[in-house]
Amino acid sequence: MFDAKSIIDALVEGDEGKLAELVRAALDRGVSAKQILNEGLISGMDIVGEKMENEDMFIPEVLRSARAMSNVVQMLTPLLAEGDVSVAGKVVIGTVKGDLHDIGKNLVAMMLESAGFEVWNLGVDISPEKFIAEIKAREANLLCMSALLTTTMPMMKKTIDAIAAGGLRDRVKILIGGAPVTLKFADDMGADGYAPDAGSAVKVAKAILQ
Amino acid sequence: MDTKGLSGTQYRPLSEEQVKTIHDAALTILERIGFTFESGLDETLEMLEKAGAKVDHENARIRFPRDLITREAANAPRRVVLFSRDGKNDLDLTENRVHLGTGGAAIRILDLETSKSRPTTLQDLYQLGRLVDRLNNIHFFLRPCIPTDIPQAAYDVNVFYACLRATAKHVMAGVNDVEGFSRVVDLASILAGGREKLKERPFISIITSFAISPLKLCTQSTLIMQEAARHRIPVALSCAPMAGSTSPITMAGTLAQLHAEQLVGIAICQLTNPGSPLLYGGIPGMANLRTMGYLGGAVECGMMNAAAHQLAHYIGVPNYNSSGLTDAKIPDAQAGWEKAVTTLLAAMGGSNYVHHAAGMLESMLGVAYEQFVIDDEIIGMCCKVLKGIEVDAEHLALEVIDEVGPGANFITAEHTLAHMHDEYFEGNGVSDRKSRIKWEKEGAQDAWLRARQIVKQILSGEEKTYISEAQDSAVRQRFDILF
């Protein structure tokens, strides 16, 4: 019998040592890496994401859980067969040109990674051209853009327009966020989704890719 | 009661010993850890290197010897005066003299008619300026919101124009770039009657967020800061680390990092133009650890902002900081207590130029017309605390006590008539002190509604303009004014 609950608890508590121990013990008992990943770790991160969205958890605690997750995933990776892991999506993420803020954007990247997305985090001050080049190179199906400043928000629209002009708009969904961004703003500029925080970003990302 | 420039020495969150410890820690940070930078600052780096800083170009790191930092801090003027245009609200920022006013770059405002949150416009900025012009306890007008209805390239000149048209109080704002700065100086020079007159009485000043915490120079803002120093336009060196995300979670660690960041800004300004006027602009804040957003109304913000003044005062530089933020979304009870506590602490701490102190809601994202009226009342009460209790023969009133005699009353005494308007704080009318019967008869209004009436009364009154027709046509000939 696979005890997913204790793995989930250790992950939510961010207890890295205990989590690794539990995962190792499960493997020793013959539980498959796939089952540990899907029933234990991903379920655990779903809870973390929900707590984060409800503001029930401090972000440093969320990150501690994400780090614990990524460490045990490294343990499991060699044991996973092809097809065991379904990639939720290929994401290119960055802060728009002129804006140097990255804390929130990095949180989103980390939460997406924990939820099974393949993520290319480009950093800050990313021009429309750079976004376009990376979307092409990575064959991404989701672009996440962030802006913290009211003065750089219009750059999101410029980037979306450039993507449309480059003929990529139907290949990639666009999700935007950042403190001053609103749903209305996202709708007005033609984004596919808006997330007010990193916890809900994962949900929105999954929804718009369906 | 004139509430400007009273002395705030009543609250000292740090002991003298603790101030020295934090100052010393900041020097250690600059010597050992240093600052990082982005491209585009070659001349600035060269200037710093010449002055003795060690620049590691490969790893983008500048380290500062202690004596360089202390020498340049000593060059900064101890006294900075921010002028008004009518002379009624000149702000002498020395020692522990306290001034409070507006600030921020809000993008949302509660609509005066619908109470719903909507984007801020250039018209809002102008009307808020008119309102603040008439609220006596708000000592200066730092643009509290962004005109989201005009193109970004038009911000700089139009923001200053709307503010300067609406009020004679000192006007401060940020600019987008160095070109924007020169346009704003040109605009202000036209209104001053020449560049020299503006230099004599700078009635505008600039904010630059030169540092991105932790310990990084922002190229664009550093260049603007240096340009302001060259023109001797007073500049507030804004840096706003958030405890827990962009500075250590602990208050002492946040203050040490913030002080280090300020010392670098001051050194750059003084090396650029020795003696140029500036404000120490450390704004210690806190991250909301549940969202990573900015936490506005925390009591620790009040404590740390008072401490920031102590650090500025220690190196003899006037300071710019923050109070009166709240995480409440409407002018409710939470807004009231958070604003009252942080503003009282910042004022009692002797902060020289406290922005955000009027109008803000939703941390830094929103403003409301009514909130400016409520905060004018809070500021007035805080300043009254600074005034203290006068104890002299006239105020001890022994003669009157004798004259009135035991068992009588003081209601009709001359002494009562002589002092009743200055011994106690008289507000702007927003505080309800009526009987319940009267209050119910007048619609049982809460503070928000009472404030709204005052706003409407002021805004429907005479529209005073502080830009003459001749100045206006000169300005419009030169700039694209969208107002």
Image (tube, coloured by chain):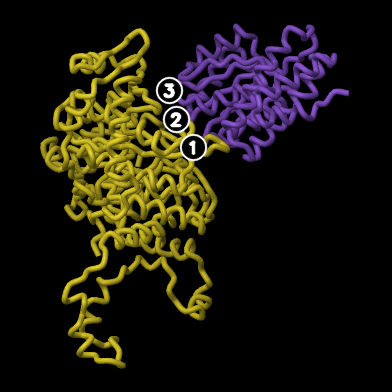
Report which quarter residue A73 is drawn in.
top right
Taking the spot 40% from the left edge, 63% from the top edge, the residue there is B454
Q: What residue is drawn where x is 30% and y is 37%? A: B281
Q: Is residue B131 left or right of residue A64?
A: left
Above or below B105: residue B135: below
Q: Tag 2, which secondary structure?
A: loop
- Tell which chain the image draws in yellow: B
How packed mark 2 is, by other alpha carbons closer than 10 Å (few <14, some 14-19, many 20 or more), is some
Which amino acid type is marked by label 1? Answer: Ala
Identify the residue under disc 2.
B246
Pointers 2 and 1 in contact (CB under 8 A)?
yes
Residue carrying label 1: B287
* Chain of residue at mark 1: B
Q: Which chain is purple?
A: A
Q: Which residue is mark 3?
A: A98
> Residues under labels 3 and 1: Cα distance?
23 Å
